[in-house]
Structures are given as structure tokens and as C-alpha cells.
Amino acid sequence: MIARIATVLLILSMYSCYSFKGISIPATAEYFFVEDFGISVRNAPSDINQRFAEALRRKVINESRLKYSEANADLVFSGNIIGYNVNSIAPEEGNTTALNRLEIRVKVDFTNVDNPDEDWSNNFSFFQDYDSNADLQSLEDGLVVTIFTQLVEDVFNKAFTNW
């Protein structure tokens, strides 16, 4: 009797872990593809679009049941890096600022080949602040990774959860 109860509780806890994640992938979808993103800004690192596409590929591979395929994909992500801005924030006396802010904006197009009613296009943005006395070039890779982590999470949630 106790073994049966324990088994039922184990099954329920496993089910609740999966549904807590909230991933909702169409049953007919088996493959996805992330096109190389374009870049529509001049001041960004030249490979930023490729780095974003790769981060999105890794996220979907690692956190879904979908397989990556360049041919016959059921779900397709594409888009552009549309913003890469550094702005001064947190003003101080004497016309200086304490912090700078790096903001990246991405336009993502999502296509569901089997169900075009689920297609969408959306802009996503995120930023990271850093000390204004710091050299952006020395911090840039780390800031971009942090920003991409959130942007990819937002894109993933838009595509695969019912938010």
C-alpha cells in the first residue's frame, strides 16, 4: 500500500515538474531551424548576429524535445539585430555619469510551418549597466552574454510557453 502511494506521488511530482516548466510545443513539430540573423546596426560587433542565433539554437536544443534541422523544419526562427546602444545613465555633479547602459534589441520572426496562425513577429530588448569609468571593449563580451541570456529566454518563452 505504501509503495503504491509512493509511486503515485512520484509520478505526480514528475508530471508537475514538467508542467511547471510550461513548455507547449505542438505535437506535430519535430524539427526547428534558426536562420542566421541579420544585423541592421553599424556600431555592434560584427559577429553579434551569429552569436545570438547560436545562443537561441543551444537554448531550444537543450530545453526542448525538438531536433535541429536546416531542411524540413516545422518551426523556424529568423530576424535581425536592430539595436545596439550605449547610453549614459545615473548623472553626477560636473556633467559626468556613474553608469553606462548597453542595450541590445532583436527583432524575431517565428514561423510554424504546420499552423501559420501561430506565426508571430516581435521585438525584444534587454540591457546591462556598467561603470562609466570601465572600458566597454574589455567588458563587452560578458555584457553581451548576459544580455543574450535574457533575450533568448524571452524568445523561448514567447515561442513555447503560454504567457
Image (cartoon, rainbow, N blue to C red):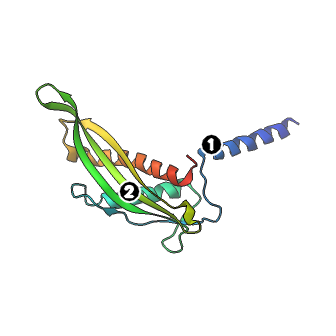
User: At 14% from the left edge and 25% from the top edge, which residue is drawn?
Assistant: 93
Q: Earlier in the sequence, mark 1 or mark 2?
A: 1
Instruction: Specify the amino acid type for callout 2.
Output: Lys
Position of 73 relative to 19 (above/below): below
User: At 51% from the left edge and 70% from the top edge, which residue is drawn?
Assistant: 69
Q: Which residue, as the protein is rendered here, is positioned at the far bottom?
A: 71
Q: Nearer the viewer, mark 1 or mark 2?
A: 2
User: At 65% from the left edge and 62% from the top edge, which residue is drawn?
Assistant: 27
Residue tagged by mark 2? 107
Residue 20 tag number: 1
Lateral position of residue 23 relative to residue 132, left or right:
right
Q: Give the percent coordinates (x, y) of residue 130.
A: 26, 37
Q: Give the percent coordinates (x, y) of residue 70.
A: 48, 72
Residue 124 tag number: none
Position of 105 relative to 47 (above/below): above
State the SS at label 2. Answer: strand
Q: Which residue, as the protein is rendered here, is positioned at the far top?
A: 93
Q: Give the percent coordinates (x, y) of residue 138.
A: 22, 45
Q: Nearer the viewer, residue 104 or 119?
A: 119
Instruction: Specify the amino acid type for callout 1.
Output: Phe
| Category of crowding for the residue at label 1, using alpha-carbon neighbours closer than 10 angstroms: few (below 14), some (14–19), many (at least 20) | few
Compute the Cα span from label 1 to label 2: 28 Å
Q: Are marks 1 and 2 in contact (CB under 8 Å)?
A: no
Q: Which residue, as the protein is rendered here, is positioned at the far right?
A: 1
Q: Nearer the viewer, residue 136 or 126?
A: 126
Position of 82 relative to 70 (above/below): above
Quadrant for residue 10, please give it. Answer: top right
